[in-house]
Image: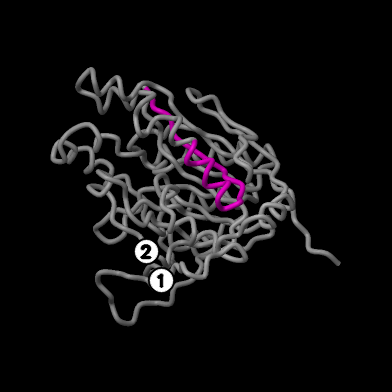
Amino acid sequence: MEDFYPVVKAAAIQASPEYLDRDATVEKACSLIDRAGSEGAKLIAFPEAYIPGYPWWIWFDEPAAGIPFFMKLYKNAVTVPGPAVQKLSEAAKKNGVYVCISVSEKDGASLYLTQLWFNPNGDLIGKHRKLKPSGAERYIWGEGDGSMMPVFDTEIGRLGGLECWEHMVPANMMAMMKKNEQIHVQSWPSCFPQPEHLFSNYPLETGAKAYSIINQVYSVISSQIYTDQMRDMLCTTEKQREIMQPGYGMTMIVDPAGHVISSVPRDEEGICYAELDLSLLIAGKFLTDPAGHYSNQSLRLIIDENPRPPVTIIGRAEERTMSYEELQDISAGGTSGAVALN
């Protein structure tokens, strides 16, 4: 009997958060999961830093000016486990879907930009932390490491994800290629409105499509949009208000040839869907697999998947998947001590 390659319905969400309000944004996220699940999606992708919102102030002013906003972001960050994770877990289980959602994660006293992955049973099966925050993002988030670059082998395909500018780093592409992902979640913030800007729609969309072509994967690309609420909260000058014009998302689903097969208008909230036929990946791999038959033996990439914490506590519990039942129990206060999840 020949191998089976499924056809998977995926959903990419374009939406703004309830800015810097974790609990309200979690409620909105769960509502969007319900909506996409009711439409038959089996994989649902959210934008970068969706909970509780992207720290746009880092690009507007000198670092110290953003400290009051950072304090609000910090107080609304997501802990794992915790009530926010519990609610997302329940939404995934209720709808029987895979969910990839990007959050500002608080671990110890620091924040990290993290994709959380849930399976249809509501289990938190893993997470990816952005390896190197981009530019001024380093004022906000710490770095991830190679132990948190998962690709999940599931009944709907091999699922992986990266965040924003990670898609422009060749070593990241090669690492994910070696892990043979088939459906890739790209989590992005909004774009800038100026056409000539490095972060405007055109260059970012081009880079996002290039990832699909180079790695021969379907990309489920999700982004936020700016809102009047965000602009009124963050902007103090007319120049800043010009940067944060409402809209400017880039949510779409791209096939391995770089074709956009579904999208959301850039200035609207919405969800786009597409049926992903994984058997079509075979022809692409016939032509190119730089981590396999199309490799160059003179060039090698070594991936270190060992956790690299700056401080190690001897006797830490074994890293493992956290089940739906554990998430409910811990978040409700019924279990003492957090279970480590890598």
Total number of numbered discs in the rendering: 2
* Residue annotated with mark 2: 145
In the displayed structure, 245 sits above or below 123; it is: above
Q: Are marks 1 and 2 in contact (CB under 8 Å)?
A: yes
Locate residue 336, reporting x and y percent: 38, 69
Q: Residue furthest top?
A: 238
Query: What number is the disc on residue 239?
Result: none
Please tell me whether mark 1 or mark 2 is closer to you in this view: 1
Residue at 78% x, 60% y: name it: 4
Q: Residues within 10 Å of mark 1 (few under 14, many from 20)?
A: few
Residue at 48% x, 55% y: name it: 173
Does the magenta portion include 336? Answer: no
Residue toward you, 316 or 55? 55
**Left or right: 207 as drawn, with respect to 105:** right
Does the magenta portion include 212? Answer: yes
Q: Residue furthest front?
A: 298
Query: What number is the disc on residue 304?
Result: 1
Q: In the image, what residue type sits under mark 2?
A: Asp
Residue toward you, 23 or 145? 145
Q: Residue furthest right?
A: 1
Q: Which residues fall within the magenta stretch?
A: 206-227
